[in-house]
Image (cartoon, helix red, strand yellow):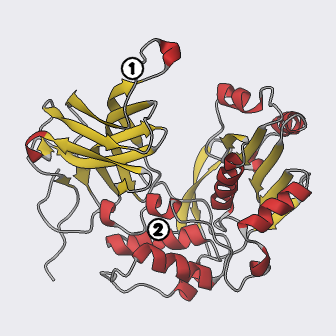
Amino acid sequence: MSDPVSGWGRLEIDGGRRVFAPGDEVTGTATWHLPEAPESVEVRLYWETRGKGDQDVDVVARQTAGGDMREGSFRSLGSDGDLPFRFRLPEGPYSFSGKLISLLWGVELVAEPGGALGQVEIVVSPLGAEIRIGKPEPPA
Amino acid sequence: MTDGGGGRRARDNPFAAQRIDRLPWRPPAGGPGGDECSLDDLLARFAALGHRAALVGPKGRGKTTLLETLGRRLEAQGLTVRRLVVTPHRRPPRAELHRFLAAPGRRDLLLLDGYDHLTSWTRHHLHRAASRAAGLLVAAHHPRRLPVLLHCTSTPALLRELIDELLSGREAPVPMPSAEELYRRHAGNLRLALRELYDRWAGRPSTGGSSGIRVEDGRRVEVEATTANPGSLPATR
């Protein structure tokens, strides 16, 4: 996700890895280039659902740089910067897809102000792949 | 339970709810007043109505989408928007209702989806709060005490436009009914029509609007709907 006018962000997961088992560590680096220094940037580990019904989203973990001066955690950020991140995946839920609903895991980079700058989808599964639910389609 | 087979995944379905929710509002092409309801027109009309008005219409005509779109535009104009959604199946918790109604200021706009589902007590307090706020904009089936900003309508042409945008040139894996047939079958309810397309794409028996569960007096009652009575949406999970 990038925009030469409003800036860009990038997430790189170490080793280019995309598939993880529950309990694994997800490590990498978030990089941003913005027209102005943001007040804060945050890397989020989340899962979301997609499908016929309303979407559910859960931000499981966050790593923040910068922050609110009122909270006493302020550290000034530059318009260009990077933030290493490290998350320990929970035991679930697993990435899965059926016809009615899919559950996807991802890591996203958000700047304030600026909004979402980038995201990377990952698979969390004990089987090394997204779990497929439902009957297989008959061969064409 | 896993399978290694094929099958059309929910995440890939072009008619997934998240994709539908991101569709921008547009006036129905060829519909009544379609040439007179640009967003700028509606915002000007809202101001002329003293920033107190209702979007009205039956289910599935885009009231919620338009309500949110206008809310974002009014936020961009500097107002602070408070939002509340009330449905027959979801009464907001007391704390959420209190936050919505509590001491609005002159820069606060109250945005309410589901005006019809308020109790008379809540409606009374809503109007009291709105008298101190910058404005009140609701989505409802009936306007009651509020002037109508727009009667939201739909047309087969609008449904066709939405389908084309969701498909984005993708070819459907199965035969799909025409927009006109869908529109007729679901009595103009665009959301139900698109939900039927979700099921068809997924290769599921369509439950779009042909049956559903309705909550009546706290009990879940099975409803067999007709095109004249699309009924409530079926449980999805």
Picture residue at 90% right of the left edge, 37% below the top: B131
Quick check: B28 above or below A22?
below
Q: Chain of mark 1?
A: A
Residue bearing the label numbered 1: A75
Q: Residues within 10 Å of mark 1 (few under 14, many from 20)?
A: few
Quick check: A14 above or below A3?
above
Quick check: B135 above or below B129?
below
Discs 2 and 1 share one subunit:
no
Quick check: B233 above or below A35?
below
Residue B27 at x, y percent in the picture: 68, 74
Q: Which mark is residue B207?
A: 2
Q: Is residue A109 left or right of residue A5?
A: left
The quarter of the picture where residue B142 lies is bottom right
The quarter of the picture where residue A41 lies is top left
Q: Nearer the viewer, residue B80 or B59?
A: B80
In this rendering, does residue A106 appear at all?
yes
Label 1: element kind: loop
* Three-letter residue code for mark 2: Thr
Picture residue at 53% right of the left edge, 73% below the top: B193
Q: Chain of mark 2?
A: B
Picture residue at 83% right of the left edge, 61% below the top: B44
Residue B174 at x, y percent in the picture: 32, 83
Label 2: element kind: loop
Q: Nearer the viewer, residue A37 or B145?
A: A37
* Three-letter residue code for mark 1: Arg
Mark-to-mark CA distance, 2 and 1? 53 Å
Picture residue at 47% right of the left edge, 51% below the top: A54
Residue A62 at x, y percent in the picture: 33, 29
